[in-house]
Amino acid sequence: MKIDTLRLTAEEALGLIERKEASGAELHRAYLDAIAERDGELHCYLRTVEAAEGEGVPIALKDVISTKGVETTAGSRILEGYVPVFDATVAARCRTAGLPTIGKTNTDEFAMGSSTENSAYGPTHNPWDPTRVPGGSGGGTAAAVSAGLAPWGLGSDTGGSIKQPSALCGNVGLRPTYGTVSRFGVVAFASSLDQIGPVAKNVRDCARLYAIVAGKDPADSTTVDVPEVVLPEGESLAGVRIGVPKEMNEAEGIEPGVTAAVQRAIELARELGAEVGECELPRSVEYGLACYYLIAPAEASSNLARYDGVRYGLRADAEGYYEMVERTRDAGFGDEPKRRIMLGTYALSAGYYDAYYGQAQKVRTLIAREHAAAFERFDVLVSPTSPTVAFRLGEKAADPLAMYLSDLLTIPSCMAGLPGLNVPCGLSEGLPVGLQLIGPQLSENTLFKAGHALERALGFDPVPERLR
Amino acid sequence: MTGHEWQPVVGLEIHVQLKTRTKMFCRCANGYGGGENTQTCPVCLGFPGALPVMNRQAVEWTIKLGLALDCEIAPRAVFARKNYFYPDLPKGYQISQYDLPSCTNGKVLVPTPDGDHEIGIVRAHLEEDAAKTTHVGGRTGRIGGADYSLVDFNRGGTPLVEIVTGPDVHSSEDARRFLQLLRQTIVELGISDAEMEKGTLRVDANVSVRPAGSSELRTRCELKNMNSFRFVAQGIDAEVKRQIALYEAGEEVVQETYDFDAGSGTLTARRSKEEADDYRYFPEPDLVPVEPPAELVERLRAEVPESPARRIRRIEGELDLDRAVVLVTGGLDGLWQETVEAGAERVAAANVIANRLAGADAAAVEPAELAKLVEARDRIPRTALDEALGKVAEPGFSAAPYLEQEAVSDSAELEPIVARILEANPGQVAAYRGGKEGLLGFFVGQVMKETGGKANARAVSELVREKLQA
């Protein structure tokens, strides 16, 4: 049979397999064919995996996820040619669930970026408009799901790398509660913030994939036991208390088209029975981004120290050890990792630690408390995921601060370790707008339920208009 | 600045390699024996995405050691990252407890002839060891200028406890006494072999001096690479001497790290170029804090045996300080006690055990049999005693066959031999008669040799003295 990967959801693909209308290998082949057809323009994948291993629904994995026997570069030259000898826990869980890997998707180098333009292997293009970015860092996975090059995929999110690309590509992405999904084997950016999560065409698919990868892992000490995942059904939001944080919906830089789409979604939620009220997260929005850009680079400066040319990856020629390390890192890292390593090194330096890293951690506690207070009154908080729709390639590449502001609204809840779900809520200028739903820790089932009801009511078509 | 007395001020840093079955943060085997880089995995090689997981045994043993050193056990200890580049550090950072260690504020009372000397334990914390590097070629054996460097990651990631004392050690003799007690404490806890020669116990010393009676802390220098207690003492003495000479010459001490060379007894300054001084510590986000439940701490406290220092003070009353120290720090005091209980005389038993059984497996010795040997030590031939003591730790050892052998104490038999020896050594005889009474042992030894060890030493000794006084 001819498989139309453009519209096929993971759940539908599963139906094909269960009814024996298609095998895992046939599905895998269909996606490889779609990639051959459309990925030349989009560049979602850094490499594909030809052999289909498993009888389940194929999956795309962001290239920060270690895959045994398959090159894993994290979008960096410094890891060019590095082939892991072990699977990341999430890759192993996908393997155990029988999900064949389609390929490894593009990412900003070491997941540092909001447009996937920082990949050492060239940018990914937005399937809705290839002159625009897909968001980042997980632009490869998000664009692949939207363009029918994968039914679902895994991304990693430090300050918005799952939610923001999902918003810009018009699909559903979950950044789970910190500690629910193992980070073992995932190339680290900022350990206290990194989380792995699913990207899919709809909320139910997202919940299914989350159920496969979530759960305590003895190899990651920061993981916790996770409540059983409930696949969302129904269209009512009766009894759900939705908070609208003023600062996150009125922040400077939010495009009017984005505000309009989000407002319509909130109105719809009220019609579905939700109790909607306003709330405040003043310090989270004012200080979240600044603190994030101390904590994340600080941890990154340490996490990236292992790329020294001694054991794997790139090694530059030099006379002595220190010279070799310097030259390897100079040649292997792009501008953004270098910028963050310098920022982070500075923030951790003797005499500056208390003023920067230490202070940022204190503010982080305040942000968590501020959110906790809001969750005493509300079950879910909503805001735009990204202040803007997808911007043009190169538009912000020369201005790191403008790029950092893309994550203004996703960062606060990441800093608080909270789960967040992006659900597409309409178009602005012909491009998708994402609605961000934030819940308290371990409230993924609530987010799935609310996201699913909204998604049904909104009727957003996740297939890019130009590909229909 | 001359004309007054100087007091050495020494703080010690001791690294103890724990003999856990696996490494600190991964499941690789911990220990020697494997070929280079065979006891490694993605975690201890610092592969991308690999994460550390704490070794429960190492954490518990650290707490146990802290309890044995009278420390406060932190209800919340935190591992941090110590960041620096070196090929023996695969992650680019070492995971180590830093500002919140598991054990703080302890003390060891060191019994000395002039009372107990209290050595404060500032902290004891858990960390991972670095890998082993070998720099080949070049002049210095260092990374700079080497032709190439080899790294063996088997040692990388093995658990280490670092114990830091206060600046409370005021002589090389105190340092030696303290280290002996500490080592014995560690060995008795069963957490490490604590052998300096093997590097499972490593000692660095921070040394300064000050005018006696003053409480100031002057510039200190760090001594490294001393691989026996004796060398630690020698190193401290050499550094103290060097610093006093500097001050007395009107110069200043410059903070520096020195390697002690045991062969020449000299100190060589390290080039400070290779040392980074800003480690950019921050809490290790891949691990959760160590929060031992109170019941665990109490269980571990109950498992800590009576301290060596306390045992020294206890048995010192029945012997004397020196013998008590030798027995306890040799792990022989238990055997001594049982041997005395089996009927042996205290001092004689202590002498035999301390002088003849050092290094033997004390637990394998049957005290009743040993007691018989101690009682018969002067009566049976020396050769028989030597042989018996050599076998006393063997399974099923019986003293009986040795006790049957009688030493020759018959004067008639011994006299001609004594006469012959004296005649053959006229110089020594003259010296003895001139007051060098220490030569008695020489004559006794000669006679023993002549009789093939079969003579009764005491009888020979009396006979020789008698003849010489004649």
Image: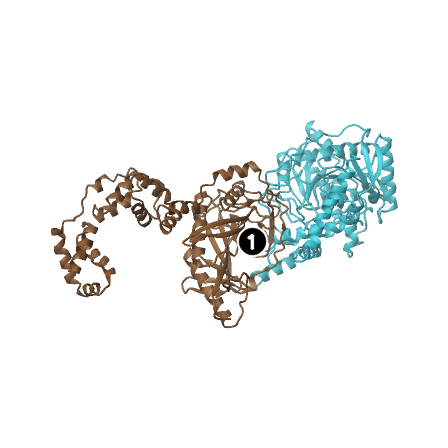
Q: Position of residue A72 (x, y in %)?
A: 63, 47
Q: Quadrant of the N terminus of chain A?
A: top right
Q: Nearer the viewer, residue A210 or A73?
A: A210
Quarter of the image where one finds residue A468: top right
Q: Is residue A1 above or below residue B319?
A: above
Quarter of the image where one finds residue A351: bottom right
Q: Position of residue B274 (x, y in %)?
A: 56, 62
Quarter of the image where one finds residue B363: top left
In the picture, measured across the screen, residue B470 lies left or right of residue B275, that is left
- Badge 1 marks a residue whose secondary structure is loop
Q: Position of residue B133 (x, y in %)?
A: 50, 56
Q: Nearer the viewer, residue A415 or B208?
A: B208
Q: Position of residue A409 (x, y in %)?
A: 79, 45
The chain letter of the cyan chain reads: A
Which amino acid is tagged 1? Leu
Display colour scheme: by chain
The chain letter of the brown chain reads: B
Q: In this rendering, does residue A133 appear at all?
A: no
Q: Which residue is mark 1?
A: B89
Q: What is the tally of numbered marks visible in this picture? A: 1
